C-alpha cells in the first residue's frame, strides 16, 4: 500500500506500473485547467488518476486500461479513496475507445506509456512496459481524437524516443509546447523527458530542466517538492 498526499492511498496490483518516480514527475508536470476533465491513456491500476485527484480537488479523471486485472485494481483504488464521483476506469483498448466517450470532450490527456519497442528489452519486459498494444502512433492518435481544440497531452518517456514522439505529435495535429529533461544527478545523462503537446497549438517550445539529486547525492529540492517532503 502506498500513502499519498491529502490522505489518499494506492494499492498496486502485480504486473501494473508501480508508484514510480516517472508517475510522480508526470503528475507534477501536468497543468490542469479549472474543473478539468482528464483522460488517462493506459491507466493501469489508476495511479495517475488518484495522484491527479489528490493534487486537484475539482478535476475528473477517466482511465482507459486494456488489462482487466489492472482495471479491477483501479476500481478498488477508486472505491477505497471514495472517488466514485470524480474518477472512472474503463476496461478497453485505447485504439478502439468506447463510443460513449465523446471525441473532443477532454481538457487534457495524460499517459505513462510503455517505453520499449521491439528488440531484446521488449521480450523480457512485462506487458505494461511494452508497446505491443500501445504504439506511439496509436497513443497520439487517441489523444488527438479525444482532446478539445487547445487541450494538452502530457506524457513521460525515454529521451531516445523524443524524435519519434515529436513526429507522431505533428502527424496528429499536436504541437510540442513544453519539454522537461530529467537527470538523476547534475552531471548525469538525461534519463527521462516530460513532454506536453497542444491540439492545434502554434509553434513555440519552452525548455525546462530538473534534477533528482544535488551535487552531494542528496534529494534535490525539486525531488522533495514532488514527494511533499
Image (cartoon, rainbow, N blue to C red):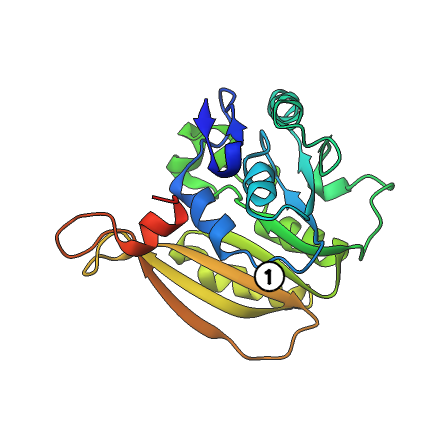
Q: Seen in the image, is 33 located left or right of residue 99?
A: left
Q: Nearer the viewer, residue 69 or 24?
A: 24
Q: Seen in the image, is 110 located left or right of residue 225?
A: right
Q: How many marks?
A: 1
Q: Is residue 188 above or below residue 204?
A: above
Q: Residue furthest left?
A: 216
At x 69%, y 37%, the residue is 64
Q: Nearer the viewer, residue 41 or 118?
A: 41
At x 46%, y 66%, the residue is 179
Q: Residue furthest bottom?
A: 203
Counting from the top left corner in percent of width and height, residue 26 is at 48, 50
Counting from the top left corner in percent of width and height, residue 150 is at 71, 68
Q: Seen in the image, is 79 located left or right of residue 154?
A: right
Q: Is residue 111 above or below residue 180?
A: above
Q: Where, by quadrant of the figure, is residue 74 drawn? A: top right
Q: Is residue 215 above or below residue 51?
A: below
Q: Residue furthest front?
A: 6
* Secondary structure category for the residue under label 1: helix
At x 42%, y 63%, the residue is 180
Judging by the rendered image, the residue that carries numbered circle 1 is 168
Counting from the top left corner in percent of width and height, residue 69 is at 61, 20
For the C terminus, the quadrant is top left
Counting from the top left corner in percent of width and height, residue 40 is at 64, 44
Amino acid at each position: 500500500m502506498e500513502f499519498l498526499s491529502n490522505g489518499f492511498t494506492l494499492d498496486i496490483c502485480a504486473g501494473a506500473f508501480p508508484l514510480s518516480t516517472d508517475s510522480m514527475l508526470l503528475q507534477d508536470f501536468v497543468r490542469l485547467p479549472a474543473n478539468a476533465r482528464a483522460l488517462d491513456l493506459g491507466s493501469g491500476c489508476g495511479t495517475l488518476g488518484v495522484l491527479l485527484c489528490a493534487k486537484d480537488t475539482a478535476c475528473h479523471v477517466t482511465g482507459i486500461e486494456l488489462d482487466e486485472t489492472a482495471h479491477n485494481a483501479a476500481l478498488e483504488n477508486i472505491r477505497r479513496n471514495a472517488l466514485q464521483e470524480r474518477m472512472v476506469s474503463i476496461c478497453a483498448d485505447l485504439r478502439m475507445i468506447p463510443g460513449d466517450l465523446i471525441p473532443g470532450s477532454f481538457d487534457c490527456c495524460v499517459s505513462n506509456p510503455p517505453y520499449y519497442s521491439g528488440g531484446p528489452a521488449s521480450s523480457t519486459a512485462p506487458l505494461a512496459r511494452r508497446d505491443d498494444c500501445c504504439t506511439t502512433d496509436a497513443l497520439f492518435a487517441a489523444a488527438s481524437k479525444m482532446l478539445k481544440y487547445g487541450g494538452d497531452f502530457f506524457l513521460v518517456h525515454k529521451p531516445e524516443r523524443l524524435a519519434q514522439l515529436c513526429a507522431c505529435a505533428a502527424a496528429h495535429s499536436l504541437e510540442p509546447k513544453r519539454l522537461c529533461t530529467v537527470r538523476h544527478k547534475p552531471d548525469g545523462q538525461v534519463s527521462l523527458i516530460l513532454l506536453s503537446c497542444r491540439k492545434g497549438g502554434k509553434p513555440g517550445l519552452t525548455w525546462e530542466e530538473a534534477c533528482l539529486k544535488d551535487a552531494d547525492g542528496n534529494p534535490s529540492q525539486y525531488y522533495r517538492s514532488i514527494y511533499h517532503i
